[in-house]
Image (cartoon, helix red, strand yellow):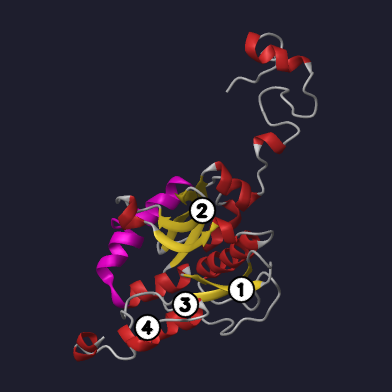
Amino acid sequence: SNDAAAQGARGLGRLAGHETLVNAHRDLTRALGWPESAPDISWIEVPKKPSGNLTKHPVINPTCVFEKLIQHDEQLVNRILRGPERAASEYWENLKGHVCIEPISHWLGPKTIPIAMHGDGAPTHKTEGLFTVSWSSKTVQAPTIQSKVIIACIRKGDITAGTLDYVFGHLTDEFNTLLEGKRRERNHLGQVLENAGEVLAANGYTGACIQLKGDWEFLNQALKVPRWDNADRMCWLCNASNSCLTCLWTGEVMSGRGHCSPMRTI
């Protein structure tokens, strides 16, 4: 710590023994500083195991990423957000009339960045895993490590009923704000927000989240898409069902008889 102090770091002795992540983050940034162009860490309340009580959890808001990069780092704006010249305009022109953008078409313009949100659950060791939510621009062609921006990471062992609902509710507020280009008056819980109506400091740039990508576990958590083994009719092509293990179709799966005939051509 003496060497660190000699180089200008202060307060390193306070970095150990914190009871909360919020306090640990506060003292870490006080001691080491924070890059000017780096987005701030925000804290949202989510229920976590074992108690299910609301607990503060760190997130990196997409709106903050837009504001920080556009204000301070033009090179990263091109590499992470904007991509080639006129890329956003051409992207929206190619999707003109598509059902996925019709409801938001009046918000779209040459400075609206098309965004995909990603979700993934990966094991960290035998008994624990990490659920990660990130986003990336659809107009940028770059390796994953250079183009994806982390929103939140949650240990699977912390996830309880409602945890991800709170996270996705917050992300709904964030992406709606990013699309409209100004702060909303209330969040998804009906709570009044600070700086309501304030225009984002992003030089006119906005973002439209139009795609959700991830494995089936993520889609199950985010969109409530049922798992195949919990659905009464798990196949959209045939009559497969988990409600009756002696139904005729179970014997036909292996033989290919009967259940194949009503299948719709793809």
Q: Can you tell which mark lies on residue 55?
A: 1
At 53% across and 82% down in the image, what residue appears? 198
Q: Nearer the viewer, residue 223 or 13?
A: 13
Q: Earlier in the sequence, mark 3 or mark 4?
A: 4
Q: Earlier in the sequence, mark 4 or mark 2?
A: 4
Q: Is residue 192 left or right of residue 112?
A: right
At 52% across and 43% down in the image, what residue appears? 215
User: Which residue type does callout 3 highlight?
Assistant: Leu
User: Which residue type does callout 2 highlight?
Assistant: Glu
In the rendering, at what x and y percent does residue 123 appear? Answer: 47, 49
In the rendering, at what x and y percent does residue 28 appear? Answer: 38, 82
Q: Earlier in the sequence, mark 2 or mark 1?
A: 1
Q: Nearer the viewer, mark 4 or mark 2?
A: 2
Q: Can you tell which mark lies on residue 18?
A: none
Q: Nearer the viewer, mark 3 or mark 2?
A: 2
Residue 85 belongs to magenta span? yes
Mark 1 and mark 4: span between their CA atoms? 21 Å
Mark 3 and mark 4: span between their CA atoms? 25 Å
Which SS class for mark 1? strand
Q: Can you tell which mark lies on residue 200?
A: 3
Mark 2 and mark 1: span between their CA atoms? 20 Å
Instruction: Residue 71: tell me if it is visible.
Output: yes
Q: Earlier in the sequence, mark 3 or mark 2?
A: 2
Badge 3 crowding class, 10 Å Cα cut-off, few under 14, some 14 to 19, many 20 or more, is some
Which residue, given by chain and number where applicable, does mark 2 sit on? Answer: 128
Q: Which residues are magenta?
A: 72-95
Which residue, given by chain and number where applicable, does mark 4 sit on? Answer: 29
In the rendering, at what x and y percent does residue 147 appear? Answer: 34, 56
Mark 3 and mark 1: span between their CA atoms? 28 Å
Q: Earlier in the sequence, mark 3 or mark 1?
A: 1
